[in-house]
Image: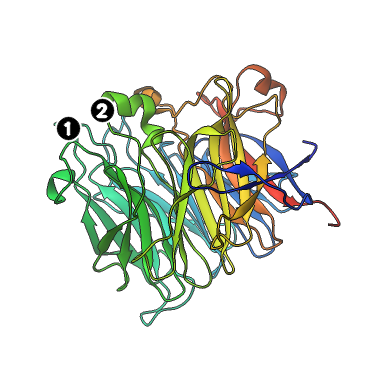
Amino acid sequence: MTPRVASGYRAGLRASTNAAASADYVTDISYTEYGSAACTLGVASDNTVFLAPAFTVDGVGVLRSSDFGKSWRASVPEGGRGSRHRPYLYFDGVDDRLFLHTGRFGAIPPHPLRAGFTLAVSDDRGETWRSRKVASTARMDATLFAGPRNTGSGRVTYLSAPTPFSVRARPLINVTRQVIWRSFDGGVKWEVAGGFDIDPKNIPGLPSREYVTFGKGVVGPDGTIYIGGRYGRRFAVAVSRDEGLTWDVRMVPGSALAKYHGPLHFLLLGSRYLLRESTAVDDDGNVYVVWPDRDGLLHAAWSSDGAVTWSRPVVVSAPGVRDARFGAITATGSGRVGIACYGRERGRAFHGFIAQCRDFRTNRPVFVGGKYNEPDAPLFPRGFCSGFRDVVSGHALNEIVRVHFAPNGDLVVGAAMQMRGKNRQRPWAARSERTEMQAVLGRLGRIDGA
C-alpha cells in the first residue's frame, strides 16, 4: 500500500478534536496472505515481527517477517493441529523466547469441551519448538506475559485464564475465577500462583446478572502485575505485588462500559464487553488502560501510583470514529503511548485505526495517527463480525487487536481482515479450509528520512 500521511487530534473529556501535529508520520498495511483470526504479535530487538495465528495446511502456526512486512514465512510447531479458537502468541523480548498456545477446547466433535492448552515454546524464533499441555483447569482465553527483569525468585513467565470457561451463559455455563499460573524456567514447568473471583455473585455490590472478564496482564519494572478488564459496568485493574499469589482489584473512577443484557446479546455484540489488550505499563512504572464507553468512544486513563489513583478519563479515539471495538494499548519510555482498535465512521464498514502520543500524562494529550488499511478496503466491509455466532460451526474468532512499539520507533498492530467484496482484490491466498480472514500488519511510522 502507498503510505498515507497521518493526522493529529487532541484527546478530550467528551470527544477528541482535530489538532495540528507533526506531519512526518505515515500509516500503511502489510498483507500476510495467510488465513487467520484474533491476531496477536510480537517484535524482536532487530525489528523481526511475529504474527499469529497462521492457519496453514499443516496446522496453526506463527508468521515471521525479517523485512518489516514485505515477506512472511510460517512456522508450525510439531503437532500444531490445535483449536483455532483464540490461539495466542507472546514474544518475550528479554529472553528472546517465542510462545504460542493453541486451545484443546472444541465446541464440536471429535473433541468437544476438552480442557487445557498446548503450549509451544521456541528459543530460536520458530525454527524448533518444544510443546507441553498446560493450565488443565481452563479451556479458553489464556494469555501469556512476563516481567521485564529477574525478580528475587528469578525470571517469571505468567499464564492467566478464566476457569472453567471464559463465556458465561447461566445456568448452563458459569465463570468462577481468574487463575494465574507461573513458570520460573521459561515455560517448562508451571505452578498455580493464585487468582481472584470473577463470578458476579461472589463480588459484593455487583449484580449477579452482570458480566466480569479480564484480559492480558503486564508487569511493571518493580515486578508488580496488572491485569485490566470489565468489572460489571466499570473498568478495573487487578494488582499483585507478590508474583501472582494475592490480588487486589481496583476500580478506575469515571469508567462507564456498555450495559450487559444477557447471553443472546453477548453472542451478537460480545465485542463490546471483551477487553483483551487494555492495559500497559511504561518504563517508569506508570499504568495505562483503555476501554470503549457505552456509546462506543474509546477512553483512556493513567496511574502513577500502582493503580491506586487515576487521572480523569479522556476520549482517545480519533474524531469521527464511533463504535470502537477491541481497543488495545501499549506504552514505552516515559509516557509514550500507542493505541489501536477497529472502528466505524459512517456506514457499516469497520476500519483499522492506529495512533500514538509522545506523552499521555500531559493535559489534553495530542495523538497522531489514522487508518492503516486502504480506504476502499476496510477490515470489515459489511459491519463488524466478532465470530461468536460461528463458534458452533467450527469457525475461528477474530476478537483481538495487539499493538506494540518496535525498536526502530514504529508503532505496529496485528489485526484480522475479512476477505469479502473488494477486499478479495488484495493479496490473498487462503491457506486452510473455512477461512475468510487474513492476518494483516498495520504500521504508524516516520516518513523515510524524516
In which image quadrant can residue 241 be found?
A: bottom left
**Where 332 sits versus 432, above or below?**
below
Could you say where residue 124 lies in the image, as x and y percent from the top left?
A: 59, 62
Residue drawn at x 37%, y 54% as measured from the top left: 228
The furthest residue to the right: 449
- N-terminal of the pair, mark 1 or mark 2, is 1
C-alpha distance separating marks 1 and 2 = 8 Å
Q: Which residue does the numbered mark 2 point to in the structure image?
A: 263
Horizontal arrangement in the rendering, residue 430 relative to residue 261 (left or right): right
> What's the amino acid at mark 1?
Arg
Could you say where residue 158 lies in the image, as x and y percent from the top left?
A: 37, 62
Could you say where residue 284 lies in the image, as x and y percent from the top left?
A: 51, 73
Quick one: 31 or 213, which is closer to the camera? Answer: 213
Q: Which residue does the numbered mark 1 point to in the structure image?
A: 170
Residue drawn at x 44%, y 31% as measured from the top left: 396
> What's the amino acid at mark 2?
Pro
Horizontal arrangement in the rendering, residue 1 relative to residue 342 (left or right): right
Residue drawn at x 71%, y 31% as measured from the top left: 374
Quick one: 358 or 29, which is closer to the camera? Answer: 358
Residue drawn at x 56%, y 55% as measured from the top left: 364
> Mark 1–mark 2 contact, CB under 8 Å?
yes
**Where 29 sits versus 94, above or below?**
above
In which image quadrant can residue 274 be found?
A: top left
